[in-house]
Image (cartoon, helix red, strand yellow):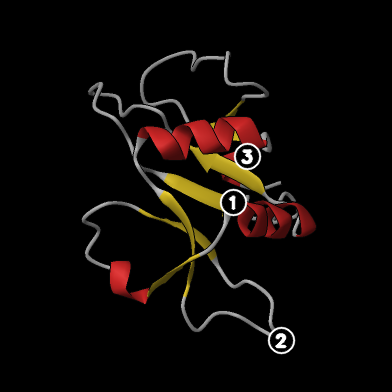
Amino acid sequence: MSRSLKYAQPIASPDQRPERLGRSLVTTSHAVIQRWARARKAKPATIAGTERDGRVGVLTFNFPGWREGGRLKQITWDQWFKTFDLRRLNFIYQERRSDGKQSNFFKPESPDREDG
């Protein structure tokens, strides 16, 4: 199990809240992921050039004003979630930083990753 999964609070529905500010969270819930992204005006995307054999590449989001936005290719929510589910990923994220400001931190991660 990865270290990030080991210490993240599981969130199964949009009604659940973090135990504290700055808490790492983990979910596979499409509703939770969409709510998080929409609250940040982020659009589902992939990194251009990471596609293989016609399949979606690295999953990410295009945040308004993000300077790396030129490397991103917007995709549909259906494409994003189909890829997320096929890869059996977890969505590790943060709602708020420990100082209370909104956090854009996220990382799609395989539950099979071992690092600690």
**Mark 1 and 3 residues: CB-CB less than 8 Å, in contact?**
no
Q: Callout 3, which amino acid?
A: Leu
Number of the front mark, 2 or 1: 1
Determine which residue is flagged by label 3.
5
Q: Is residue 71 left or right of residue 90?
A: left
User: Would you identify the image quadrant in which residue 54 lies?
Assistant: bottom right
Number of the front mark, 1 or 3: 1
Determine which residue is flagged by label 2.
53
Indicate the position of residue 33 as horizontal and vertical percent values: 55, 37
Q: Which of marks 1 and 3 is nearer the N terminus?
A: 3
Residue under the image location 51 percent in, 15 percent down:
17
- Against 116, residue 22 (above or below) is above
Compare residues 112 and 96 and report the one nearer the observer. Answer: 96
Residue under the image location 65 percent in, 37 percent down:
30
Q: In this view, does 4 lie to the left or right of 30?
A: left
Gap between marks 2 and 1 measured at Cα: 20 Å
User: Would you identify the image quadrant in which residue 3 lies?
Assistant: top right
Q: Which of marks 2 and 3 is nearer the N terminus?
A: 3
Gap between marks 2 and 3 measured at Cα: 30 Å
